[in-house]
Image: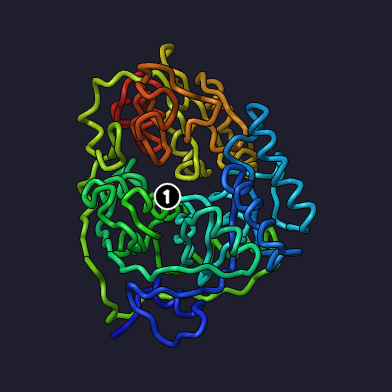
Amino acid sequence: MGYTITEKILLAHAKGVKKIGPGDFIMAKVDVCLGNDITSPIAIRAFRELGRKKVFNQKRVMLVPDHFIPAKDMRSANQADILKKFAEEFGIENYFELGEMGVEHALLPERGLVLPGDLMIGADSHTCTHGALGAFATGVGSTDLAYAMAFGECWLKVPETIQLRFTGKPKKWVGGKDMILHAISDLGVSGALYKALEFTGDTIESLPMEGRLTMCNMAIEAGAKSGMIAPDKITETYVKAALRKYKPARKEYKLVKSDKDAVYADVREYKVSKLEPVVAAPHLPSNGRPVGEFKKVKVDQVVIGSCTNGRISDLKQAAAVLKNKTVNPATRLIVIPATQAVYLQAVKEGYAEIFTRAGGVFCTPSCGPCLGGHMGILSDGEVGVATTNRNFVGRMGHPKSSVYLANPAVAAASAIKGKIAHPGDL
């Protein structure tokens, strides 16, 4: 009996075992551990309670203050300050201050800090994003992060794997966001609870890395422990470019793929050639339906950004829709590039000017309003369209506000129309 990519990576990192299977508990060596300005202060307090005088590896602990930075109030400023002082005290090499930081799950892949074959944990649920690189990456609690920072280990239960096979050529304006929303609508928000989602098929094989990152990012919205895509030439091209540009300390990686006789808990197939852009209605990511079913929904605010869709290809797609057009006067458009590098490229390629001339505004790379943080909170009764990953009650502000999830092209078209719209309608 063969192993899935998830099982292979976990076995390679497991201590004291020669074989594993779904349901087994293992103690595993960690290649990368990640914290942010919400979760790290708790982890740091727990770390100090352990009495450790050093972290397990100063190059492998990543601290990214991205949720409330620039600080929106005294409490958020204090949270960020805890990270900064801890990084200084313990010599954390990969601490990212304002000016170089970005949304953590976009920043680390961009800089080559997570590599194929890695086992990565992060005290943030969307750590599963990094599975697009062919790594096992999963979210954990702050105390698990504290232990990993101290000893370079964590305990895990080996998950079963669900294989999601996507075949066919997508239509124009259909991408990774639409495919994952479609799959979540099929699985439900707990359909993959504590399972690994393995994305495969000829559609995935031709999908750019940024689309893959989007899909793995939202694996958690189906309850999954991780999202996984087998590394290939597209992965290697992306990784090698990051290693050349940023020259991180680690450069060696391992390409891991599932065995042909690997066992899956479930296998589902999706033919994407007829798929239309998908919009997820409030208040669950699983409420996905074709965009055409929402054309009467008026929109107060549009947000383009986040660890799901704040990369340069996302801004490029939205800019293509907005070029020479104007945002509806009754609608706000907020654009948040995922990293400083994305922002600079958007300026260089003219996308920033397109957004600004259309009537949109740019914000500093940050999670911003995605989690109800700042720079775009919705008020009582307001409706938002966002390229983010969650639309729970009160997720982006007032409990009586509503959030619709969509891809960047649909978001841009909705900003122009002042109501949810298909970009082809323009």
Binning the other alpha carbons within 10 Å of mark 1 as few (below 14), some (14 to 19) or many (20 upward) gives many
Q: Residue at x 51, y 77 (%)?
A: 13
SS of the residue at dot 1?
helix
Coordinates of residue 379 in the picture (x, y in percent): 43, 18
Left or right relative to 307: residue 166: left
Q: Residue at x 26, y 62 (%)?
A: 165
- Pick the residue in front: 38 or 378: 38
Dividing the picture into quadrants, the one containing residue 226 is: bottom left
| Residue, far bottom | 18
Q: Is residue 274 above or below residue 302?
A: below
Coordinates of residue 174 in the picture (x, y in percent): 32, 44
Q: Residue at x 59, y 60 (%)?
A: 33
Coordinates of residue 420 in the picture (x, y in percent): 31, 25
- Pick the residue in front: 263 or 298: 263
- Pick the residue in front: 94 or 40: 40
- Count of numbered circles in the view: 1
Dividing the picture into quadrants, the one containing residue 112 is: bottom right
Q: Where is the N terminus found, in terms of image quarters?
A: bottom left
Q: Is residue 27 above or below residue 176?
A: below
Coordinates of residue 52 in the picture (x, y in percent): 72, 64
- Pick the residue in front: 370 or 124: 124
Left or right relative to 221: residue 270: left
Q: Where is the C terminus found, in terms of image quarters?
A: top left
Left or right relative to 106: residue 98: right
Q: Is residue 380 above or below residue 100?
A: above
| Residue, far top | 329
Q: Residue at x 64, y 31 (%)?
A: 75
Query: Which residue is labeled 1 in the image?
Result: 214
User: For the residue marked with disc 1, what is the amino acid?
Assistant: Thr
* Scheme of colours in the image: rainbow
